[in-house]
Amino acid sequence: WNKIIFIGFNALTKAEEKIIKYLIDNDKAEILWDADEYYLKNIQQEAGWFLRKYFKTWKQTDIKWKEDNFANDNKNITVIGVPQNIGQAKVNGEILLNLDTDDQQETAVVLADENLLTPVLNSIPENINEFNVTMGFPLKLTPLYDLFDSIFTLQENAEKFNKIQKFKKFKFYYKDVLKILNHPYIQKLSEFTSKDNSSFLLNNSILEIKSSNKILFTIDELIMKYLNFGDNHSNIIKSLFTDWKQQPLIALENFTFLIEQLRNIFIGLGANSEIKQNYNDYKIELEYLYSFAKIIKRIKTLLSDFNFINNIKTFHSIFNQVINISTIPFYGEPLKGIQIMGMLETRTLDFKNVIMLSVNEDLIPSGKNPNSFIPYDIKREFNLPAYKEKNAVFAYHFYRLLQRSKNIYLLYNTEANDLGGGDKSRFITQIINELPKYNPKINIEEKLLSVPPVKDKNNYNIEIPKTNNIIEKLKQKAMSGLSPSSLNSYRNCSLQFYFKEIIGLGEVEEVEETIDAATLGTVIHDVMFTLYKPYLNTALNVDIVKKMIPMVKDLTHGSFIKHYKNSDVNYGKNLLIVNVANNFIKNFLKEEIKFITENQKKGNTIIVNYLEEKFESLIKINTSGEYNTIKLKGTTDRIDTVGNTLRIIDYKTGRVETKELNVKEWEKLMDDSQLAKSFQLLMYAYLFYKNQQINSQYIEAGIITFRNLSNGFMKVALNGSTHIDEPSFLEFENVIKQLLETIFDINIAFRQTDIIDNCKYCSFKSICNR
């Protein structure tokens, strides 16, 4: 060419700098800079750093396209702090909604964070018919990437487990399996690939895996036992759950097969769709599949050319690196409608209205962490660009975009998280402090969008009146029997009693990955029963208890196998919990030996009378002028006799405090949740009293906690006395009657408790919105 014109450049590479300088010096080229006096003449302004350098070194005096917009133009700048990224997308939608139709053609939405693209697109108002996206959609944000990443995680975790445990067969972690099976694409796969109700079968399989309580599954188990849906599905399931044997080629073959299957589904769904919008949705899915198919082909080429990718970890890393720089291009009309773009796409473009999102520090400008192996000192020595130059580039783009704009909205995230946020960009602070002084016609308004406080949850009350159906259920409960735990539910919260006892709600079924407290308690009770059962109604001595100690390990292990089904108790946290149970029981037996020795010196004989004994009793109450008979029931862990004292003992594996066993007023037993253990023990004692002839025995009820055996037998104290006599039983009977009359009174509804602390460990607090 006779002449070359360079337009809109700012930061030049060394090569560009030399070429352009040479061509200008030889009168072969001209350069048109796009700059403003505001950031050129102020040497503190990093936006003009590169331009000032070139003007000085090239000795340019006739600088074209150097304007003074910041000094002369009217500008309205609104700075809005918004909680969370989704909030920014919603506010952006509100701003767009209020734009005039003519202004839509001159508006840019600029995203500093590409992760905002999806929420921004989903928040565009319906009245905006035309918009153009100039930035690509990142592949790492697609559901297909999430599926592939889940499969990688499945394989890598399986490899770790199998290396540690040295299993004979390859096993997969249940959470990884469930994540894949719950993925929407796999659900679609299940719906489409068979005429039978395979979607129902798949969801049933998910429930079975959860209820199996297994942590690790072999491939054969998954395919044969849980995911056996017939021939149409077997190959698909095998492609998801197979041993890659650390060979990337096997992984690529499985991915290719999965893409083909998904492609057939979405083509089929698109062809059968009656709604055009749905068809367009499936076209997007097909674009995802096409992009991933290309990437897999590229990686196959890499594998054939280079042999260093020889394990799944390296393959996963390469896969992620390729995905991270890959985007799906959008096709639109750049001359129509609102323009949605990234920061770098705004170069040389001017808009009347600019809405910029994520104007946060570490995003605009980006942080100091360099993506380079070259240390900062070496960069300085060889004049390579570092973070200072990078910040100057961002500053130029920022100010140049604002240069000719009239209405500017700068949104930033007020909430701190792993991806940045919380701190607005220093560029915002600069323009707030400098621009109104530089030009009074520039109006800057700051806003902070706050989420209104949630209405006090305590004001949201639930009341369940006692309908005929509920009364019928209560009558059934009266016949089958009420236990101390069910009555404690009512004492804790009458609504909790309704959920648990009347409509039969339970906790959500989840895989018990490690042994929970309930299972630990069940095992200890089971082992204690087995150890002492042969010696019922026999005077205990030191030799008997010493014989029990060697039996503890095998009994405990066997009980865990029985109660913690299908799961391994021989490694990890489970093994630690098994050892804790062993130590709990052995320490109890050692304390029992001390207790027997001390009592033998006093001439007291210790006899275990009952173990896990069920007691029942009928009680009559007066409700609405009618007498109803209610069955009470309970199972005591142990009842023994020490001399002339009869002890009713409840085993606990948790912590027990003395105040929980100190009853100062009988009325407190009606609703004080802190006295739940006292209520339980007194009810056991009451049931025993109603079933057995009490002679001159001194009755005590209490707890032995395995957590702190040094406390010994912790007794219930009634107004300071640990002796439970006949008047005490009559007082407790009155408490029981009052409680039951409240439960069976048709005029008293089931209500939430007013004591919020009672809700802390309630299984139903999400229903109550507590």
Image (spheres, rainbow, N blue to C red):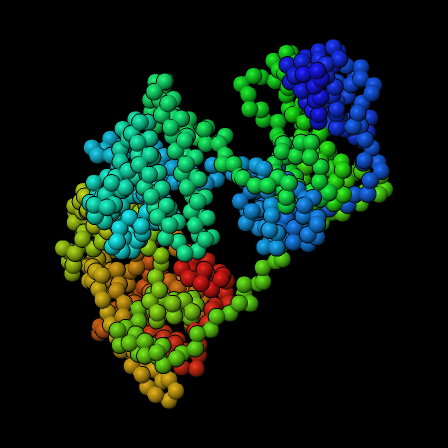
Question: At 45% from the left edge and 60% from the top edge, which residue is drawn?
Answer: 766
Relative to 303, say whether 226 is above or below: below
Question: At 41% from the left edge and 41% from the top edge, which residue is drawn?
Answer: 286
- Quadrant position of residue 660: bottom left
Residue at the extreme bottom: 625
- Please provide percent x and percent y for residue 210: 30, 50
Is residue 417 visible in this depiction of the protein? no
Q: Is residue 77 left or right of residue 144?
A: right
Q: Is residue 352 left or right of residue 711?
A: right
Marker count (numbered): 0
Question: At 23% from the left edge and 43% from the top edge, which residue is drawn?
Answer: 234
Relative to 626, say whether 742 is above or below: above
Residue at the extreme front: 2
Is residue 258 visible in this depiction of the protein? yes
- Quadrant position of residue 484: bottom left
Q: Nearer the viewer, residue 605 or 437?
A: 437
Q: Nearer the viewer, residue 47 or 508?
A: 47
Q: Is residue 184 left or right of residue 593?
A: right
Question: At 19% from the left edge and 62% from the top edge, which residue is drawn?
Answer: 609
Q: Nearer the viewer, residue 276 or 605?
A: 276
- Please provide percent x and percent y for residue 155: 32, 34
- Please provide percent x and percent y for residue 618: 27, 78
- Please provide percent x and percent y for residue 586: 25, 45
Quarter of the image that includes the N terminus: top right
